[in-house]
């Protein structure tokens, strides 16, 4: 058995401390899943102790367990000594600023952790700053998830600084740097800052960092109060960046002008393969700009324009563009009262390109 799930029927009523004690002598279980198990701080003390015993565990999932700062800091301290764990998920627990500082200290010493999920853990700007500071020293972390942590423009500025120097973490979901001294650590490839409030100012800082960063491949900025100025800055970065392949700007308010700026970038960018612009109030005029760019772009394979108030005019622009573009294979759209002949045209375009998947409603 490689995976132990604390929710399994045969052990759900067994004391967690007894299970954890057994893991100290374990040589086969590599994944411990305790999601929604209400483990609590006392049990976490046992888990932290086990981690320091260098067990075979490589993945520890403790999402939504009512763990407080006391428990999460013990896990953080254990990471300074553990040399086997590669994935840790503490999402929906309480870490706060104090916990973030302890995790930052741990990340500066830990040499094996590659994936860290701290989604919705109450970090705020100050807590995220500590974590981001650690990124400038850590050389192994490849996934960091700080989604939904109340990070604003100030935090995004620190994140941007970290991105300029940490060029290899494979997945980051909302980070900030709180330092003036940097160590070059090439790790970051995926950054998820979704469901925060970085707004235009923060997006501009992140965009400026992308002009220098050479390894980030995925950037998620969903639901961040980004409007035209932020989209304009991001578009400028796309014309210089040569590594980003996935960009999610959905559930923002980039509007027509923002779409026009992104469209200009698409005519020049040669690395972006996935672009998500759903729920952005782009409308027919904004979609026309995107459509005009598609015949010039040879790398984009996935485009999501859903929920953008697109009618017959916008649908016609997209259909015409697809006649000339042969690389786009996945398209997400929903139109407002489009004509039947346009729907038929999209169906025909999909049949002509067997690899093309269209989600049209």
Image: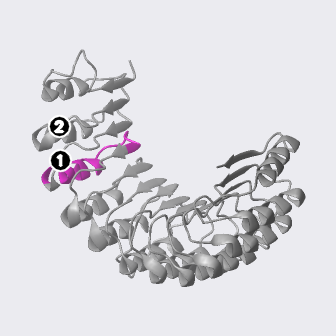
Q: Which residue is mark 2?
A: 39
Q: Is residue 57 visible?
A: yes
Q: Classify 10 Å Cα crowding around label 1: few (below 14), some (14-19), many (20 and above).
A: many
**Seen in the image, is 40 located left or right of residue 162?**
left
Which x, y percent locates residue 101? 25, 65
- Residue at (83, 63) in percent of width and height: 321
Q: Is residue 80 magenta?
A: yes
What secondary structure is marked by label 2?
loop
How far apart, in angstroms, are the residues tagged by discs 2 and 1?
7 Å
Q: Classify 10 Å Cα crowding around label 2: few (below 14), some (14-19), many (20 and above).
A: many
Mark positioned earlier in the residue sequence (2 or 1)? 2
Q: Is residue 212 visible?
A: no
Which x, y percent locates residue 345? 83, 51
Which x, y percent locates residue 157? 43, 80
Q: Which residue is mark 1?
A: 67
The tag on residue 246 is: none
What secondary structure is marked by label 1?
loop
Depth order, front residue of 126/282: 282
> Which stretch did the figure color magenta?
70-87
Which x, y percent locates residue 85? 37, 41
* Vertical order, 208 against 108 (above or below): below
Q: Quadrant of the N terminus?
A: top left
Please identify the quarter of the rendering in which residue 238 is found: bottom right
- Residue at (29, 43) in percent of width and height: 63
What is the tally of numbered marks visible in this picture? Answer: 2
The answer to whether the residues at label 2 and label 1 have Cβ atoms under 8 Å apart is yes
* Vertical order, 149 against 164 (above or below): above
Depth order, front residue of 311/213: 311
- Residue at (48, 81) in percent of width and height: 200
């Amino acid at each position: 058995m490689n995976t132990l799930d604390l929710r399994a029927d045969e052990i759900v009523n067994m004391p967690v401390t007894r299970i954890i004690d057994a893991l100290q002598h374990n040589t086969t279980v590599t994944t411990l899943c305790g999601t929604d198990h209400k483990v609590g701080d006392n049990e976490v003390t046992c888990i932290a102790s086990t981690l320091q015993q260098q067990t075979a565990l490589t993945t520890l999932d403790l999402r939504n367990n009512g763990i407080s700062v006391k428990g999460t800091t013990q896990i953080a301290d254990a990471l300074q000594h553990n040399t086997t764990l590669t994935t840790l998920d503490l999402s929906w627990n309480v870490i706060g600023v104090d916990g973030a500082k302890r995790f930052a200290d741990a990340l500066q010493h830990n040499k094996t952790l590659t994936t860290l999920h701290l989604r919705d853990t109450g970090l705020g700007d100050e807590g995220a700053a500590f974590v981001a500071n650690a990124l400038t020293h850590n050389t192994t972390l490849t996934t960091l998830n700080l989604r939904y942590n109340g990070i604003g423009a100030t935090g995004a500025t620190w994140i941007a600084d970290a991105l300029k120097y940490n060029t290899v973490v494979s997945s980051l979901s909302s980070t900030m740097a709180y330092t003036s001294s940097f160590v070059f650590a090439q790790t970051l490839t995926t950054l998820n800052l979704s469901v925060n409030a970085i707004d235009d100012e923060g997006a501009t800082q992140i965009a400026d960092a992308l002009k220098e960063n050479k390894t980030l491949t995925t950037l998620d900025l969903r639901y961040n109060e980004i409007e035209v100025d932020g989209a304009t800055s991001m578009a400028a970065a796309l014309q210089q960046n040569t590594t980003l392949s996935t960009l999610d700007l959905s559930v923002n308010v980039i509007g027509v002008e923002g779409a026009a700026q992104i469209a200009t970038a698409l005519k020049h960018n040669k690395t972006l393969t996935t672009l998500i612009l759903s729920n952005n109030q782009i409308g027919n005029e904004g979609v026309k700009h995107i459509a005009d760019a598609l015949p010039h772009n040879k790398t984009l394979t996935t485009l999501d324009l859903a929920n953008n108030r697109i009618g017959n005019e916008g649908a016609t622009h997209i259909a015409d563009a697809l006649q000339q573009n042969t690389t786009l294979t996945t398209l997400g759209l929903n139109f407002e009262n489009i004509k039947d002949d346009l729907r038929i045209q999209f169906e025909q375009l999909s049949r002509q390109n067997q690899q093309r998947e269209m989600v049209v409603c």
